[in-house]
Image (cartoon, helix red, strand yellow):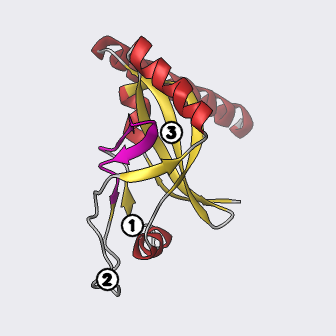
Amino acid sequence: MNKVIATNRRAHHEYEILDRFEAGMVLFGPEVKSLRAGRANLSDSYGTIHHGELFVRKLHISPYDPATIANSDPVRERKLLVHRKEIAKLEGQIAERGLTLVPLSLYFKDGRAKLELGLARGKRQYDKRQALKKRQDDRETQRSVRRHNQERSGS
């Protein structure tokens, strides 16, 4: 069972997610304890490939208070553990099609911290407006269906 620590809700609004994959993370002890306390923020983070290795940048993991000396920089660059073939495939797609790597969620799986990354393309402003309008229309439809069902069952 996966214990979700943090999700990037803004990612689905800002980007069109084309593909998803899971990566392990290289962390220090106090960072793991802070994650277990649920103290992480994915909002501004992104993935990069540097010298054939995958990293996540600007992932904020709050310092763990009891570990005074061992705490590291909360937004340091963290290495992600992914197979070399996957990195090569991602590198080609990012360079060729102008895509980006966006962290979607951070969770524990079998006691290990995992990061779900999405291969994403940025949405245009009108796409965002269309998605918002569709969501509002769907909500309104659900409300009217609920009202209609309540009226039928009440009479």
Dot 1 amino acid type: Arg
* Residue where numbered disc 1 is placed: 39
**Which residue is at 45% across, 41% downward?**
54
Range covered by the magenta-colored residues: 44-60
The answer to whether the residues at label 1 and label 2 have Cβ atoms under 8 Å apart is no
Cα–Cα span, label 3 and label 1: 19 Å
Residue position marked by numbered label 3 in the rendering: 117
25, 15: nearer the viewer: 25
Residue 147, by quadrant, is: top right
Q: Amino acid at mark 2?
A: Asp
Residue 49 occupies which quadrant of the picture? top left
Looking at the figure, which quarter contains the C terminus? top right
Near mark 2 (Cα within 10 A), the count class, few <14, some 14-19 or many ≥20, is: few
Across and down, in percent, residue 37 comes to 45, 73
Badge 2 or badge 3: first in the primary sequence: 2
Residue 107 vertical position relative to residue 39 in the rendered view, above or below = above
Quick one: label 3 or label 1, which is nearer the N terminus? 1
Q: Position of residue 102 (x, y in %)?
A: 42, 36
Q: Horizontal placement of 28 versus 126: left or right?
A: right
Instruction: Give the class, few, some or many, for how many residues have Cα within 10 Å of label 1's Cα (few <14, many ≥20).
Output: some
Residue at left 35%, top 78%?
64
Gap between marks 2 and 3 measured at Cα: 28 Å
